[in-house]
Image (cartoon, helix red, strand yellow):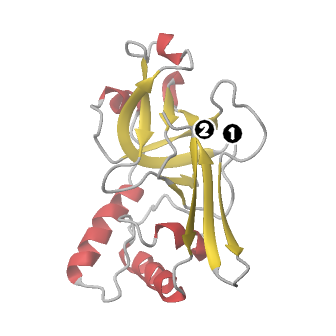
């Protein structure tokens, strides 16, 4: 299991953010889970499959965008359904409260995204995250594997925040003691992670 990651990337060109905003305004369904109160929060998903913004949009790319955006407007998957799924299924939508891994209750954000200017005047996007638990319905917990994921928010993610998480099902060896609960399965616990096509996506719940 990875317990965290740090990524540094260039900020997308202003035109890419404008195209992303236009695509969302045109194609996003009602009830979109992501509260885009600040359009710069789109920066770290502009070049991912969640919101691949072509310079020359077409009807085909718009259809793909609508299909993926429909997932971001879907109701959360019940924990029992998620926990019963085979590894690799998804992407699915979970909603819950951020909780610390045992022994990792230190203060500080679980996930944050910052734009910085380097010595040469270039603008970079720095994303830092660590694994955590998501407390979901009926006393269940899901291990959030942060590596490769993206937070769509200019506000950091902290313990106690309610979030929507979109990702693929998995299982990890239980190092938390939660596998002894009714939801544990043979020393393993449910996890959610990035997939080969779509990275893990998180947002503060409305």
| C-beta proximity under 8 Å, tags 1 and 2 | yes
Q: Residue furthest left?
A: 60
Q: Is residue 42 visible?
A: no
Of marks 1 and 2, which one's residue comes earlier in the chain? Answer: 2
Residue closest to the eye, 1 or 151: 1
Q: Where, by quadrant of the figure, is residue 54 drawn?
A: bottom left
Q: Secondary structure at mark 1?
A: loop
Q: Is residue 125 above or below residue 202?
A: below
Q: Residues within 10 Å of mark 2 (few under 14, many from 20)?
A: some
Q: Residue furthest front?
A: 120
Q: Residue at x 62, y 38 (%)?
A: 98
Q: Secondary structure at mark 2?
A: strand
Residue 127 lies, in percent from the top left, at 60, 59
Furthest-right residue in view? 107
Q: Residue at x 70, y 84 (%)?
A: 121
Asked if residue 50 shows in the view, the reply is yes
The residue located at (22%, 82%) in the rendering is 59
Question: Label 2, on which residue?
Answer: 97
Could you classify mark 1 by the number of other residues whose Cα lies within 10 Å: few (under 14), some (14-19), or many (20 or more)?
few
Indicate the position of residue 99 as horizontal and vertical percent values.
64, 33
Q: Nearer the viewer, residue 124 or 120?
A: 120
**Which residue lies at the image location 44% right of the left edge and 84% below the top edge?**
19
34 or 170, nearer to the observer: 170
On screen, 120 above or below 204? below
**CA–CA distance between discs 1 and 2?**
6 Å
Q: Is 82 placed above or below 36 here?
A: above
| Quadrant of residue 183 within the rendered picture | top left
Drawn side of residue 103 relative to residue 50, left or right: right
**Label 1 belongs to which residue?**
160
For the C terminus, give its image quadrant.
bottom right
């Amino acid at each position: 299991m990875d317990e965290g990651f740090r990524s540094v990337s260039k900020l997308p060109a202003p035109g890419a953010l404008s195209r992303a905003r236009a695509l969302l305004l045109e194609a996003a369904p009602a009830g979109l889970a992501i509260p885009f109160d600040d359009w710069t929060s789109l920066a770290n998903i502009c070049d991912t499959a969640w919101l691949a913004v072509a310079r020359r949009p077409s009807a085909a790319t718009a259809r793909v965008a609508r299909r993926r955006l429909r997932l971001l407007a879907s109701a959360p998957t019940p924990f029992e359904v998620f926990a019963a799924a085979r590894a690799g299924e998804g992407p699915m939508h979970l909603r819950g409260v951020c909780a610390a891994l045992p022994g990792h209750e230190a203060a500080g954000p679980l996930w944050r995204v910052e734009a910085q200017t380097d010595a040469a005047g270039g603008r970079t996007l720095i994303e830092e995250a660590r694994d955590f638990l998501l407390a979901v319905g009926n006393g269940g917990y899901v291990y959030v594997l942060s590596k490769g994921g993206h937070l769509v928010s200019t506000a950091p993610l902290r313990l106690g925040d309610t979030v929507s998480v979109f990702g693929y099902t998995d299982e990890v060896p239980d190092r938390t003691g939660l596998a002894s609960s009714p939801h544990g399965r043979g020393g393993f616990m449910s996890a959610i992670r990035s997939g080969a096509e779509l990275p893990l996506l998180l947002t503060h719940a409305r």
